């Protein structure tokens, strides 16, 4: 995991995309990022083929690639890099991830139901019409995410962090949010019904949203907990 | 190189096992507790435990060291001699060491504790309690906090943006994410009340 090389283009700070040997297995050979790749379409196709042909994927670097209309059901990603990727219309159940990085990725119209994603980072990502319903999302990093009309319902978000998240029309119904950090979040129409919000960590600014002047100003209404 | 993550349920701290398949050697970062899974991780892979990297001398990061030393004889690297007495290779300031066939960079980042040390292997930083997703480590006073923020800015956030941070507590993150969203590093940004014009 994380045997990642930087792009060999002089001065480029990005991670290189995975390279493959003749047996179509991931190598640790240096390579280029998507922007500097000599043949980006070929590299992308190799990555798609690798994902399609493997259930367990370790140390794949696919930073910046667009994934569209792909079925990731029961795929297992360990230590993979999907930073700045765009996921469009992905449908899966039972997707599994450990120590993978999805920072600054964009998820549009994705159904990632009953996923099991632990110790994974989605910092700065955007979720639009994306469903994680029924997922185990333990100790994940959701700092700085922007979530629009998305759902984490029936999920375990234990020890995850939503620092500076922007949550619009997003639901956390029947979730385990014990030790989950919601510091300095921005929210509109966020539902926590049947979730153990007393075990979650809201900061002072956030607490005022539940009862004070702010809730009237942004039209936020807290659903009854019991 | 592969990195395995183990959660210490007792102290909610993260322990990492880094293995180099080419030399069949392993390194452990912050052995807060030694579980059968960690031993299995090393033994099933046929690895020799070459070194232990301690980010700071707090119980949830070093309690497992006693058990580990009964089973293996690794080199122990820390900034505090008291971690393992005379068996400690005491690190100061910044430098590079070779363990398990890997190049390990280290840098002192005091503030949370005086002995806080951050290690760099490849494009991954093991930050201990110096910085974690959205937060920085606790400190005893304002002076320490300011020193910590200064050190983080100069030594950690100056790394390449896609550098991955593996903290001592909580989920992983990246340099780019912390620059944008960390509450201590970027305190003036956002703030709901400010955005709404209430202050």
Image (cartoon, rainbow, N blue to C red):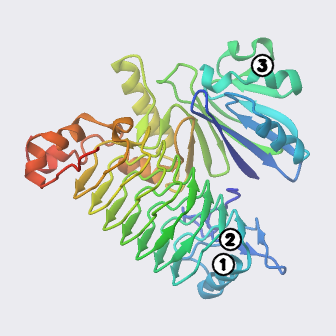
Label 2 to label 3: alpha-carbon separation: 40 Å
Residue denoted by label 3: B66
> Is label 3 or label 1 in front?
3
Is residue B79 rendered to the left or right of residue B97? left
> Where's residue B173, x and y in %?
50, 49
Residue denoted by label 1: A47
Is residue B170 rendered to the left or right of residue A48? left
* Residues beneath discs 3 and 1 located on the same chain: no
- The residue sitting at 8% across, 49% down in the picture is A216
- Crowd tier of the residue under label 1, counting other residues whose Cα lies within 10 Å: few below 14, some 14–19, many 20 or above: many
Q: Secondary structure at mark 2?
A: loop
Residue B191, located in which quarter of the rendered image? Answer: top left
- The residue sitting at 15% across, 50% down in the picture is B195
Tag 3 and tag 1, C-beta contact below 8 Å: no
Q: Residue furthest front?
A: A226
Label 1 to label 2: alpha-carbon separation: 8 Å
Tag 1 and tag 2, C-beta contact below 8 Å: yes
Q: Secondary structure at mark 3?
A: helix
Is residue B50 rendered to the left or right of residue B96? right
Residue B147, located in which quarter of the rendered image? Answer: top left
Where A60 falls versus A184 (above or below)? below
Tag 2 and tag 3, C-beta contact below 8 Å: no
N-terminal of the pair, mark 1 or mark 2, is 2
């Amino acid at each position: 995991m994380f045997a990642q090389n930087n792009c060999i283009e002089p001065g480029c700070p990005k991670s290189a995309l995975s390279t493959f040997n003749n047996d179509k297995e991931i190598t640790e050979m240096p390579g280029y990022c998507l922007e500097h790749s000599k043949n980006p379409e070929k590299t992308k196709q190799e990555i798609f083929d690798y994902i399609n042909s493997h259930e367990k994927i370790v140390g794949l670097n696919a930073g910046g690639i667009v994934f569209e209309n792909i079925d990731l059901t029961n795929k297992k990603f360990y230590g993979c890099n999907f930073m700045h990727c765009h996921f469009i219309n992905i449908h899966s159940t039972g997707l599994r991830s450990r120590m993978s990085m999805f920072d600054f990725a964009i998820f549009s119209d994705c159904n990632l139901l009953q996923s099991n994603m632990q110790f994974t980072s989605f910092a700065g990502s955007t979720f639009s019409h994306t469903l994680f319903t029924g997922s185990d999302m333990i100790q994940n990093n959701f700092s700085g995410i922007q979530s629009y009309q998305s759902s984490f319902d029936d999920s375990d978000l234990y020890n995850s962090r939503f620092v500076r998240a922007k949550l619009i029309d997003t639901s956390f119904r029947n979730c385990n949010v014990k030790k989950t950090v919601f510091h300095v979040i921005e929210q509109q129409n966020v539902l926590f019904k049947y979730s153990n919000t007393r075990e979650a960590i809201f900061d002072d600014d956030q607490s005022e949203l539940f009862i004070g002047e702010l809730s009237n100003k942004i039209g936020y209404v807290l659903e009854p907990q019991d | 190189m592969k990195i395995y993550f183990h959660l210490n349920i007792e102290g909610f701290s993260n322990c990492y096992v880094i293995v180099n398949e080419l030399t069949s050697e392993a390194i452990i970062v912050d052995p807060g507790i030694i579980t059968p899974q960690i031993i299995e991780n090393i033994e099933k892979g046929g690895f020799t435990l070459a070194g232990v990297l301690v980010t700071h001398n707090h119980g949830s990061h070093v309690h497992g060291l006693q058990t580990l030393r009964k089973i293996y004889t690794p080199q122990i690297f820390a900034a505090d001699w008291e971690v393992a007495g005379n068996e400690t290779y005491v690190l100061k300031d910044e430098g590079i060491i070779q363990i398990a066939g890997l190049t390990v960079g280290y840098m002192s980042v005091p503030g949370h504790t005086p002995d806080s040390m951050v290690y760099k292997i490849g494009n991954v930083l093991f930050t201990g309690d110096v910085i974690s997703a959205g937060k920085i480590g606790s400190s005893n006073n304002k002076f320490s906090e300011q020193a910590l923020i200064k050190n983080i800015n100069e030594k950690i956030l100056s790394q390449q943006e896609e550098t991955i941070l593996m903290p001592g507590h909580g989920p992983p993150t990246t340099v780019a994410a912390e620059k944008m969203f960390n509450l201590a590093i970027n305190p003036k940004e956002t703030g709901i009340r400010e955005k709404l014009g209430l202050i």
